[in-house]
Image (tube, coloured by chain):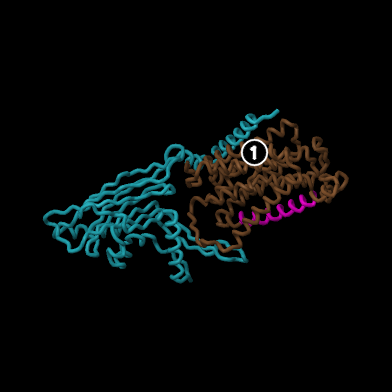
Amino acid sequence: MQIYLPIADLPVNMLLLLGMGLAVGFISGMFGIGGGFLMTPLLIFIGIVPAVAVATVSSHIAASSASSAISYWRRNAVDLPLSLMLLAGGIFGTIGGVWLFTLLRSADLLDLVIALSYVVLLVAVGAMMVSEAVRAIIRTYQGYPVVLRRPGSHTWVHGLPFKVRFKRSKIYVSAIPVLGIGFTIGFLGAMMGIGGGFLLVPMLIYFLRVPTATVVGTSTVLTLVTMASATVMHAATNHLVDILLAIFLMVGGVVGAQFGARAGQRMRAERLRLLLGILVLGVGIRFALTLLIEPAELFSIRFTGDGG
Amino acid sequence: MRHRIALSLLFCLLALAPARAERLITSLSHHQVLVTSSFTGIELVLFGSIERDAKTISRKGDYNVVVTVAGPRQTLVVRRKDRVFGIWTNAESRSFLNTPTYLAVLSNRPVSEIAPAELLRRQEVGMYLVPRPALASGIQSGEHDIFREALIRLREQRKLYVEDPKGVTFLTPNLFRATIRLPAEAPVGTYDVDVRLFADGVELVRANSALEVVKVGVEQFVVNAAANHGILYGLFTTLLALATGWFASVVFRKD
């Protein structure tokens, strides 16, 4: 069941792609994330050049986040004004990310920067998630209630000017961190081929105190739009989106996500966060090892003018 | 290049003049290979016949044939990883200009036994077709060879460079067959097929033909669209993503 991917210029097993889509989709549905941080490394691992992997995964994330955005919308779990303001920052972030991506690719530094960013980001976020979840689990065992949102406690974020009220989420915050978060997620997403859901949800909770009722739905809308525009921009500037690869990942991904979402509902929230943290940390460490251990093959060939 | 062709033409004419030399007639099973989504590689067969007549001078040794198939040429950059600040990353590199992206060297015995190395190098027979890296100042030639060897090794691992000293079989003393295997990753473009006939360590005659590897159908369409209509292609991919997502949410709707 080999299929030839026209842009990646590589024959790949169709079932392998579908399977990867399903597996990553399952995880993404379970944790309410896009799953790009898993899919991009997997594609690189099966031999697709990082540039094509990053560009193509954005369309895969667009598909899976579209499907979850629609279901959150139906449940009225999206804070549209908040999404739109995040998006305003997100679009600029995406443009910046694609710009840097193109620049690094022409300087032949893209692979290294992608790998380094994965290590730094995933190890840091993974470690934070694991320690937070472990503390939460210990607290529940000791009988304290789990407190995620502390409405009374204000951080420096709440001292910033240009305050805006978001009715659906019942928060009153400055526009600066909202735009900043949107920009960061859009930037990292386009650069690294990640939706950024695993970063965005904690950011919205800890910085903006967005309640759990709307946080995932709102973040999904941002992911959807930034990834959809990243797909268009990558296709327009670097011509690296492989539509055939995208189709297999999308189909596997959306189906897997549905089953994952059902599995996730049966698990306790802090256990889920612990698992996700371990997963994020694991991928980060895996990337770190490839940079630190002497590779078996030191040489590689680069084609000038195409491929990446 | 043109100079070389002219020179070899001259050789042919000189060879033709006194006593008739051998003539080489070759036929390739395919002149066009179509790459579709189910393409997993292909085997091409080349038949060749060595024509002699009464006037052809007799040879002491046997005939030797070297078939060289060279894919479309490109500049290849070979990079070597090195430890920089504790991290393994690409450091030094060498450029190989005008280098075949695919290369098959098939012969009836090891190329090194067919003719002296000096002649092979000068005539770019076999793996000598892979050039030396473009010169960069202050680098010793020993280093160059490491990169060239790495290039050949990496391409061989992916079956894109093939050296087969048993790839040419003589069916009769004057009739031979060569099997050319193009892997699924064979790059698109024009491939030069060069057949050279040797005897007693000298080249007698050569015959050239070509074959073309083209992407067709969906593949060609996708490659074209991605390269020439990037924005439309991107919009279409995005729409497809949205449609897939929407479809899934409808199919799996619970409420």
Residue nearest the observer in this picture, A128 or B85: A128
> Is residue A143 covered in magenta?
no
Q: Can residue A80 be seen by looking at this rendering? A: no
Give the quadrant of residue B124: bottom left
Categorize mark 1 by other alpha carbons within 10 Å: few (<14), some (14-19), many (20+): many
Q: Colour of chain A?
A: brown
* The C terminus of chain B lies in quadrant: top right
Q: Which chain is cyan?
A: B
Residue bearing the label numbered 1: A257
Residue shown at 46%/37% (left/top)? B218
Pick out the residue farthest to the left: B54
Q: Can residue B153 be seen by looking at this rendering? A: yes
Pick out the residue farthest to the right: A152
> Is residue A127 covered in magenta?
yes
Residue shown at 78%/44% (left/top)? A175
Give how far across and how far down residue B72 sits, in percent: 39, 51
Give how far across and how far down residue B130 sits, in percent: 39, 60
Q: Amino acid at mark 1?
A: Ala
Secondary structure found at label 1: helix
